[in-house]
């Protein structure tokens, strides 16, 4: 189970990084979303994985999963929606203003390549 | 009156002139005058204690952990400066009332002036050096505003900037010096520091602290080589020049040197640095002043010169020098402020301050002539005027001062300075007021009304009174000197009198006056030679340095920050992975303490879907619509994973957020290109793939190792689990953490969310009010529009489902405290229900039925949450302490009432408002000029037979 979650985090991180390094706004936003998933799941997993023991108190249950990472991730999910929305708006505004959805400044057409 | 009021009055009063602006100029100046007068009288009520040598203090602890306390003290020295600040302030306010023209915003001027006055009073009354620094910076800021008061004049703006740069830099270095001093003394209270002379002077940090503090003093008091800003600050209105640049602000540096005199002075370092700087400034300022043609520039450089004189006196480190300094501060403040105001009168009446265009004003402006002449003669050191007395004390002190092993150096330079000083005073009188009456003044000069000449006249009366009867000022000056010296010296016995006998200082005074007259005789050729001689222009040098610093900063910033986001991202990723690898390679990893859990086929299937969707997303991301579907699958799988891993709240949140995110991205994709072109090279893609795989492996390895090990210490969650029901009254621990244990975090988070939504709204507004608007309105969609944009089935369905959604949201909200749910999730669910109304019936129809704007909903949410938190104050509990009780209303079951639920209402409202405001902003962009704005909920309505067809786009199909 741990292997599955960890590899899922790894795959989402890799996909996220690759997309963030693209040159247009839309894939970069998708990449950030993927990274958000990866980070949220990672934070969540810091409470270790427990199956079938939700942190809802009940008289006949004694083991619960760690509630704190869940609380932190819950707000993180909502905040990341806000962040995504702002990023999308900025990207959209830039595109509408200049008809160009490149993520990098385009000063001289000859200088777009050759960076580290 | 308490010292707090004296300091606070000008600050509080600073609000009034702006408010009184509409009530007229007299009211505006009157209220300012009253505020200053109140502070002045308040100060005078403390006079008896000060004269008895007592220390008046007032103390409020502010941040004792940092040693920062609001501590004020009033001793002779502080009283003296406060008297100058408030007393001359009163005269300046009266003068400015008549000086400012009707075009000037008087409220603004007096507001700045009172701010400055408060800051200055704060400096001289502070007992805590950190507090003193705060006031010190405030004077820099308020003087910046005052110098640049005439915003339309480029000289004013440049002068203000230069003053702020120089004094601001000095302030920074002084902060460093003061912190060192506090470290040495172990306290930031002046009263403690002043007791520790030996300790401080023996410390190895003494010299750096001294230099840093003196840098602050020298910049503020315009000492060489920082003297250049003061003349440029003369672009300010004359009341400002008279107040800040003669009587008060430039004396702040002097004040601090005097204040620190007991602990810092007396060492060779102090003597050499301070005396040399003062001496050079005195001579240089006097020489330059002689050749200035602008009245105010002449006075500015003469101020520089006199400040140098005072600095030199403080530098000698003797008690007599200190007493002469105090006396000269008093005398200089009187005659120089009077001179500035006279210069202002001349400028005001003749419309020029250029000495070459003036002359012969004696008969035209007799009152001004008398005032200016008496003040100028005092400055020149003519007997029976106060300037003579302190100048002779200075010369006396100079004859006893041995600098650089030369007993002649200081007396000779002091005499040379005095010669030039006398010369520019004679020039001021001779070339402005004496001589023939001209007929080419820019404006016909005459004496102004008494409102303008009375303030300088009052000062000149003081000049004469002190000059004729110095014994009147003697007790006061000696009291001030005693508090300046502290325990570091005895007040000298010397009496203040006009005739001291045939002492060397008398001959030096005579030499100065005679020399000054001689210089006037040969002024023309001298001036020509001066004009022809090459001189370094301070302003050019300053601008050069600023420009060089700015371009260096620009070069550095632009090379680091070149606008290529993908480069920053690449650098970040590589750096994070590299640092992680370093930690991995050099650290030790403990053994796994947890066994791996077995995964059944269902989790493996879910994992496979997630990996496949992510892979597909990476390979197919060029088709943006497909990419959106794939990322939806990823999000869905993540939510399912949360369900599986005992996190029902997270699953519900993730799921609902997923829905609104996809809607948001769809709205954005409506405008963006539908495909991503191929443009990065193969090499680049390979490189990015390498970084991505490295990052993915690192994240995998970290998570994997982490999950197989137990926490090193007991997690705080034990506490949460144990106290959730007992303390928070809820069984859903996640929700109790959100609204109770960590409610303050949540409070911050809903605010952030609200701000994000407002930002989106603001960006939309900017776009819609800018050039983009026309483009948006005339945009031709790149995809064919649906013929039936608001189909009946969907309208009916969303209407039917709306109450159900609201019910579900309400239910999820209520159960939140005990079962999975709560404000966040309920907010998202309700938002989805409302968004569906927009989707079904369009923007116009839905927003017409909107009762409350979403900004208001966000604000209401934050307020409800905030007031819930504040409510706990009324029962003297800290912010956001929660309480709960159980009530039973028959026939219902027993249920719980918790203040946390009220807080959750706030969360709910903020989430609804933020989500809706974001999505609504996006859909506002989609409105087009040629689109039909139907007021009907659906396009095709069988019940509305007539007129329905013309609402349909031409491309309708199957309508």
Image (spheres, coloured by chain):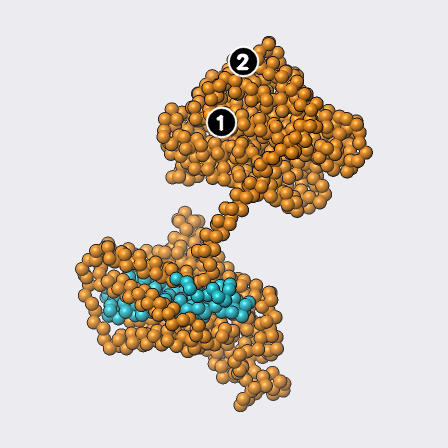
Chain colours: A cyan, B orange
Please identify, in this view, whether the residue under mark 1 or under mark 2 is nearer the observer.
1
Q: Is residue B558 above or below residue A105?
A: above
Circle count: 2
Name the residue rendered at 67%, 21% in the picture: B518
Specify the quadrant of the image occupied by residue B451: top right
Name the residue rendered at 65%, 34% in the picture: B532
- Mark linked to residue B494: 2
Per the model, the C-alpha gap separating discs 1 and 2 is 24 Å
Specify the quadrant of the image occupied by residue B827: bottom left
Q: Is residue B601 above or below residue B174?
A: below
- The disc, 1 or 2, on the residue closer to the chain's N-terminal end is 1
* Quarter that holds the C terminus of chain B: bottom right
- Mark linked to residue B274: 1
The image shows residue B956 at horizontal and vertical percentages of 56, 87
Q: Nearer the viewer, residue B667 or B34?
A: B667
Q: Secondary structure at mark 2?
A: loop
| Residue ranking furthest to the bottom | B958
The image shows residue B468 at horizontal and vertical percentages of 65, 16
């Amino acid at each position: 189970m741990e292997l599955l979650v960890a590899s899922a985090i790894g795959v989402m991180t890799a996909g996220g990084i690759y997309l963030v390094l693209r040159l247009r706004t839309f894939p970069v936003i998708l990449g950030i979303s993927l990274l958000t998933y990866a980070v949220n799941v990672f934070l969540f997993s810091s409470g270790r994985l427990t199956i079938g023991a939700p942190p809802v108190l009940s008289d006949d249950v004694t083991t619960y999963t760690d509630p704190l990472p869940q609380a932190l991730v819950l707000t993180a999910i909502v905040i990341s929606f806000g962040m995504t929305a702002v990023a999308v708006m900025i990207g959209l505004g830039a595109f509408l203003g200049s008809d160009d959805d490149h993520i990098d400044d385009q000063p001289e057409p000859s200088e777009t390549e050759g960076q580290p | 009156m308490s010292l707090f009021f004296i300091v606070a009055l000008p600050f509080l009063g600073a609000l009034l002139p702006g408010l009184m602006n509409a009530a007229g100029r007299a009211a505006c100046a009157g209220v300012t005058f009253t505020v200053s007068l109140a502070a002045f009288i308040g100060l005078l009520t403390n006079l008896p204690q000060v004269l008895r040598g007592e220390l008046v203090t007032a103390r409020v602890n502010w941040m004792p952990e940092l040693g920062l306390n609001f501590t004020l003290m009033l001793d002779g020295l502080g009283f003296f400066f406060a008297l100058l600040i408030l007393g001359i302030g009163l005269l300046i306010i009266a003068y400015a009332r008549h000086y400012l023209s009707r075009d000037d915003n008087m409220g603004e001027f007096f507001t700045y002036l009172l701010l400055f006055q408060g800051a200055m009073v704060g400096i001289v009354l502070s007992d805590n050096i950190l507090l003193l620094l705060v006031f010190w910076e405030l004077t820099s800021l308020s003087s910046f505003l005052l110098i640049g008061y005439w915003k339309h004049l480029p000289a004013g703006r440049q002068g203000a900037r230069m003053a702020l740069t120089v004094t601001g830099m000095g302030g920074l270095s002084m902060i460093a010096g003061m912190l060192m001093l506090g470290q040495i003394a172990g306290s930031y209270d002046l009263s403690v520091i002043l007791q520790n002379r030996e300790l401080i002077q023996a410390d190895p940090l003494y010299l750096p602290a001294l230099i840093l503090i003196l840098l602050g003093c020298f910049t503020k008091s315009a000492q060489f080589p920082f003297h250049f800003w003061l003349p440029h600050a003369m672009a300010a209105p004359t009341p400002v020049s008279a107040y800040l640049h003669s009587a008060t602000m430039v004396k702040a540096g002097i004040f601090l040197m005097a204040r620190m005199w007991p602990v810092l002075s007396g060492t060779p370092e102090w003597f050499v640095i301070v005396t040399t700087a003062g001496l050079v400034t005195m001579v240089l300022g006097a020489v330059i002043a002689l050749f200035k043609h602008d009245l105010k520039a002449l006075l500015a450089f003469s101020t520089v010169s006199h400040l140098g004189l005072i600095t030199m006196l403080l530098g000698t480190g003797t008690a007599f020098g200190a007493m002469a300094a105090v006396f000269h501060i008093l005398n200089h403040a009187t005659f120089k402020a009077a001179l500035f105001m006279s210069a202002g009168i001349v400028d005001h009446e003749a419309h020029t301050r250029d000495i070459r265009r003036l002359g012969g004003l004696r008969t035209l402006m007799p009152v001004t002539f008398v005032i200016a002449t008496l003040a100028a003669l005092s400055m020149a050191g003519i007997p029976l005027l106060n300037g003579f007395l302190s100048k002779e004390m200075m010369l006396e002190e100079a004859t006893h001062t041995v600098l650089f092993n030369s007993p002649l150096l200081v007396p000779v330079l002091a005499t040379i300075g005095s010669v030039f000083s006398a010369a520019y005073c004679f020039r001021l009188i001779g070339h402005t007021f004496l001589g023939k009456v001209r007929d080419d003044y820019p404006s016909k000069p005459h004496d102004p009304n008494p409102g303008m000449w009375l303030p300088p006249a009052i000062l000149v009366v003081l000049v004469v009174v002190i000059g004729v009867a110095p014994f009147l000022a003697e007790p006061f000056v000696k009291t001030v000197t005693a508090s300046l010296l502290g325990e570091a010296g005895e007040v000298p016995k010397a009496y203040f009198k006009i005739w001291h006998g045939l002492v060397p200082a008398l001959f030096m005074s005579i030499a100065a006056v005679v020399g000054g007259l001689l210089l006037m005789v040969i002024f023309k050729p001298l001036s020509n030679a001066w004009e022809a001689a090459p001189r370094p222009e301070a302003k050019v040098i300053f601008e050069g340095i600023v420009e060089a610093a700015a371009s260096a900063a620009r070069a550095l910033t632009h090379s680091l920050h070149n606008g290529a986001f993908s480069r920053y991202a690449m650098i970040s990723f590589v750096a994070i992975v590299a640092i992680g690898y370093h930690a991995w390679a050099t650290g030790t990893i403990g053994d796994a303490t947890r066994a791996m859990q077995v995964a059944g086929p269902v989790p493996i299937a879910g994992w496979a879907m997630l990996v496949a969707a992510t892979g597909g997303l990476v390979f197919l991301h060029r088709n943006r619509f497909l990419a959106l579907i794939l990322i939806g699958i990823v999000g869905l799988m993540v939510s399912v994973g949360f369900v599986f891993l005992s996190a029902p709240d997270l699953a519900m949140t993730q799921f609902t957020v997923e829905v609104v995110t996809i809607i948001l991205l769809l709205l954005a994709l409506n405008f963006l290109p539908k495909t991503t072109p191929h443009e990065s090279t193969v090499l680049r893609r390979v490189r990015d793939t390498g970084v991505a795989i490295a990052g993915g492996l690192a994240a995998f390895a970290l998570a994997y190792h982490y999950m197989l090990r137990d926490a090193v210490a007991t997690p705080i969650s034990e506490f949460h689990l144990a106290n959730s029901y007992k303390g928070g009254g809820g069984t859903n621990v996640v929700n109790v953490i959100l609204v109770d244990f960590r409610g303050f975090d949540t409070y911050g988070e809903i605010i952030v969310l609200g701000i994000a939504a407002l930002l989106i709204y603001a960006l939309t507004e900017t776009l819609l009010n800018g050039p983009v608007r026309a483009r948006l309105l005339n945009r031709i969609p790149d995809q064919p529009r649906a013929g039936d944009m608001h189909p009946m089935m969907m309208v009916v369905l969303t209407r039917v489902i709306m109450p159900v959604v609201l019910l579900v949201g309400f239910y999820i909200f209520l159960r939140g405290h005990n079962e999975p749910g709560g404000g966040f999730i309920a907010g998202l669910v309700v938002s989805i229900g409302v968004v569906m109304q927009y989707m079904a019936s369009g923007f116009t129809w839905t927003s017409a039925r909107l009762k409350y704007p979403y900004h208001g909903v966000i604000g209401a949410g934050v307020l409800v949450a905030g007031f819930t938190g504040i409510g706990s104050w009324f029962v003297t509990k800290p912010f956001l302490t929660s309480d709960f009780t159980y009530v039973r209303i028959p026939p219902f079951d027993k249920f719980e009432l918790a203040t946390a639920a009220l807080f959750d209402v706030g969360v709910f409202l903020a989430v609804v408002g933020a989500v809706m405001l974001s999505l609504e902003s996006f859909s506002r962009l989609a409105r087009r000029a040629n689109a039909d704005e139907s007021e009907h909920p659906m396009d095709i309505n069988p019940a509305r037979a007539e007129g329905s067809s013309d609402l349909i786009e031409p491309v309708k199909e199957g309508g």
